[in-house]
Image: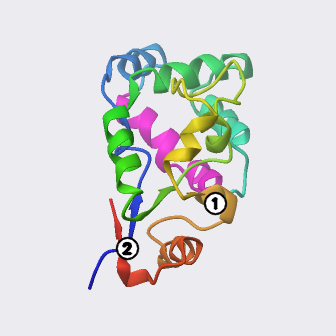
Amino acid sequence: MAIEGIIFDFGGVIMRTMDRNPRSALANRFNVSVDTIENLVFSSPSAKLAELGKISAHQHWQNVARALEASEEEIPTIRQQFFAGDRMDWNLLDYIQSLRQQYRVALLSNAFDDLRLELTGKSSPTSAYHISVSDHFLDYFDEIIISAEIGIAKPDHRIFQYVSTKLNIPLDKNVFI
């Protein structure tokens, strides 16, 4: 069976935390562990709702701030500091671009409703990520699937079926990285 599609995750694959010091400093500021901060942002009930698009990213960050006993005004700083150690793997993106000569390529991410704006450089000045991308980021992929936009998140098998349909490739001819 030949592979026809390659599906890449965003967090931990294309965008990785390379420097944990900003998260450590944030945790120290609020007198909690780094694990606590990461769980609030990525694994809490609020995060799961935001990944499914049931609440907005902004509402989720309000919940994070409440849990940290921070003010609403502190949200942009908390977001920026949380992601300050994350870096885009531009070498991987160049490789992904080369794969498009032979394969259909998709980005599939369990993410909040603001990720597409972040990826296109159209986010607010208080952007959570320090991506420094442009409109050209979308050109690396044939399809970009964000869980909050479709209301399904990994590991639900339906999201893999969804991306396969978008790529117009049978499910068993895709590989997920």
Residue at point 52%, 49% (across, down): 44
Q: Three-letter amino acid code at disc 2?
A: Glu
Task: Quarter of the image for the N terminus: give it.
Answer: bottom left
Q: Please tell me how crowded label 1 is: few (under 14), some (14-19), or many (20+) other residues with Cα within 10 Å.
A: many
Asked if residue 89 can be seen in this view, the reply is no
Q: Three-letter amino acid code at disc 1?
A: Leu
Asked if residue 126 can be seen in this view, the reply is yes
Q: Is residue 104 above or below residue 125?
A: below
Residue at point 59%, 72% (across, down): 166
Residue at point 48%, 73% (across, down): 160
- Decide if residue 6 is on the left or right side of residue 142: left
Q: 138 and 72: which one is in front? A: 138
Q: Please tell me how crowded label 2 is: few (under 14), some (14-19), or many (20+) other residues with Cα within 10 Å.
A: some
- Residue 45 lies in the magenta stretch: yes
Nearest to N terminus: mark 1 or mark 2: 2
Residue range (magenta):
33-51
Task: Residue 117: name its quadrant.
Answer: top right
Look at the image and name its color scheme. rainbow
Residue at point 60%, 68% (across, down): 152
Residue, far front: 101
Q: Residue 58: x, y in percent?
A: 72, 37
- Decide if residue 32 is on the left or right side of residue 127: left
Task: Check disc 2 and report the residue beneath it.
Answer: 4
Q: Residue 85: x, y in percent?
A: 39, 22
Q: Residue 43: x, y in percent?
A: 47, 50
- Decide if residue 159 is on the left or right side of residue 98: right
Taken as a whole, is the magenta stretch helix, strand or loop? Answer: helix
Q: Is residue 133 above or below residue 168?
A: above
Task: Check disc 1 and report the residue beneath it.
Answer: 52
Q: Are marks 1 and 2 in contact (CB under 8 Å)?
A: no
Instruction: Return the mark for residue 66.
Output: none
Q: Residue 119: x, y in percent?
A: 59, 37
